[in-house]
Image (spheres, grey):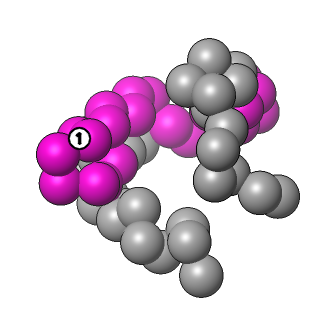
């Protein structure tokens, strides 16, 4: 999957597709300034994912 050059709305649509299939994820926040996602699961655990992990 190529993300470079993807429109913001396309990226949100893809994120929504993932969220619909993952009942264990309660919330996803994106911090653009720090290029990271904060993912909260249904048990309240917070997982940090950094954008550069997806660019490999």
Residue at image location 42% in from the left, 72% down from the top: 52
Q: Where's residue 40, x and y in %? A: 34, 41
Name which quarter of the figure residue 16 lies in: top right
The C terminus sits in image quarter: bottom right
As drawn, is 19 to the left or to the right of 33? Answer: right
Q: Residue furthest right?
A: 1
Q: Which residue is mark 1?
A: 31
- The vertical placement of 46 against 55, above or below, is above
Q: Which residues are magenta?
A: 14-37
Residue 25, x across and y down, in percent = 50, 37
- Residue 51 vertical position relative to residue 25 in the rendered view, above or below: below
Q: Pinpoint residue 21: horizontal percent, then vertical percent.
A: 76, 33
User: Hey, which residue is sitting farthest front in the picture?
Assistant: 5
Instruction: Give yes or no for residue 36 being in the magenta stretch.
Output: yes
**Residue 28 visible to the viewer:** yes
- Give the vertical position of 42 relative to 3 (above or below): above
Q: At 34% across and 48% down in the image, what residue appears?
A: 37
């Amino acid at each position: 999957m190529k993300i470079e050059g993807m429109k913001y709305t396309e990226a949100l649509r893809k994120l929504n597709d993932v969220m619909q299939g993952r009942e264990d994820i309660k919330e996803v926040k994106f911090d653009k300034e720090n290029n990271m996602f904060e993912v909260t699961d249904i048990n309240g655990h917070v997982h940090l994912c950094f954008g550069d992990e997806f660019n490999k």
